Amino acid sequence: MAKKNIIRKHAENLFAKELAALRKADKDFKPENWNLSPKSVVLYIMGGTMKDGMVISPKYFGQQKLIEQAVATLATDRALLLTGSPGTAKTWVSEHLAAAISGDSTLLVQGTSGIGEDALRYGWNYAQLLSKGPSKDALVPSPVMKAMQEGKIVRVEELTRIPADVQDALITILSEKTLPIPELNNEIQALKGFNLIATANDRDKGINELSSALQRRFNTIALPLPATLEEEVQIVRHRLESMQKALPGHEGIIAEEEIVRLITIFRELRNGKTEDGRNKTKVPSGTLSTAEAISVANNSLAMAQYFGSGKVTAAELVSSMTGTIIKDNEKDSLVWKEYLETIIRYRKGWEDIYKFGVK
């Protein structure tokens, strides 16, 4: 498949020009095997203007101090654990950190309840194993092993979904920076530059707590939900612009007003109160995260482009958001209806939202 047909490029490819410019201009100290200095990594994540006038687009809208702490952690022998509610950009931040530091965000382990130790350590090519027995040729390295061998960053998504006994396979790797291979009477010793970024949702059901021994190997940073309506609107608008650039032909228009209304609804239902604090609302079972708001806005754009006037109206907005708000049909339907009747119905200028919401 031609590269131009890829739906979503990796961060190091999508922002290759920015990374190349930062690397060329970077005169600060770089830890061994890092592509950029810590200061340049933070500039890449937070955005800003370089001395030559080139603008670096922001990848994260939030407290710069959190990103500085994350980068500083990765420059030490401590691993990094990013926690927070769903939709707080944990995966997004981890990908861009790996892209900026190692130039490679693809060394990734997706945590699930059914994952085995081989996903964190190594596996075997069973055809080779049966014909020749344990050997280097039969060994199948995990992304963690590859990162150790190449001195790069490896990412582990949803660490707390991994069973506790499998999680603990990371303890020796993170503490000794060594991966024993007893079948070959050998070991892999990590090169400088190796480190690990893990993510974990703090609202997931069925999560597995980290052992105290594993917790000590991580510096934990909690990424908060956007503090203000304006900040969340900015995030959604920026991501929509990026997505439209990545997918030419998606020419729908969504006015700032509609993004504000979408985010206002999500924030009020998520927080259990109106933005002005005067009225309480019931909270639905879903998280109504910023990521879900981006998805709703993007779907509204598609609906408007292909089945409407090309401009997002209340009809597309309500149609797209209803399925996100109503996860539990019985409970969430009542929450949504009550919100429409007690809040939206009396909000000036929101008559169209109420009209399509009660249909």
Image (cartoon, grey):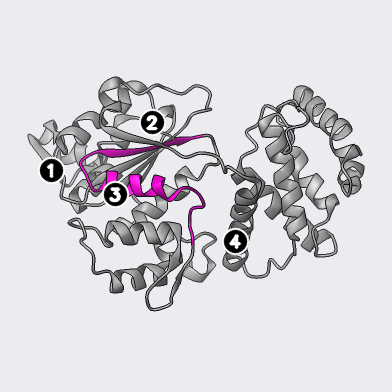
Relative depth, front residue between 210 and 258: 258
Residue 12 position, x and y percent, is 39, 62
Furthest residue to the left? 185
Say which residue label 4 marks.
Answer: 243
> Does residue 322 lie above or below 216 as drawn?
below
Q: Which residues are magenta?
A: 58-84
Tag 1's secondary structure?
strand
**Cα gap from disc 4 to disc 1, whole angstroms:** 40 Å
Say which residue label 3 marks.
Answer: 153
The image's mark for residue 189 is: 1
Residue 114 position, x and y percent, is 42, 28
Q: Is residue 78 magenta?
A: yes
- Dot 3, crowdedness within 10 Å: few (<14), some or many (≥20)? many
> Is any atom of residue 212 visible in this view?
yes
**Cα gap from disc 2 to disc 1, whole angstroms:** 24 Å
Q: Quadrant location of the C terminus?
A: top right
Side of 303 where 136 appears, left or right: left
Q: Residue at (46%, 43%) from the top-left corner?
A: 90
Residue 234 position, x and y percent, is 61, 55
Tag 3's secondary structure?
strand
Q: Is residue 312 magenta?
A: no
Q: Quadrant of residue 291?
A: top right
- Residue type of the residue flagged with mark 2: Ile
- Dot 4, crowdedness within 10 Å: few (<14), some or many (≥20)? some
**Cα gap from disc 4 to disc 2, whole angstroms:** 32 Å
Between marks 4 and 2 in the image, the one whose residue lies nearer the viewer: 4
- Residue type of the residue flagged with mark 3: Ile
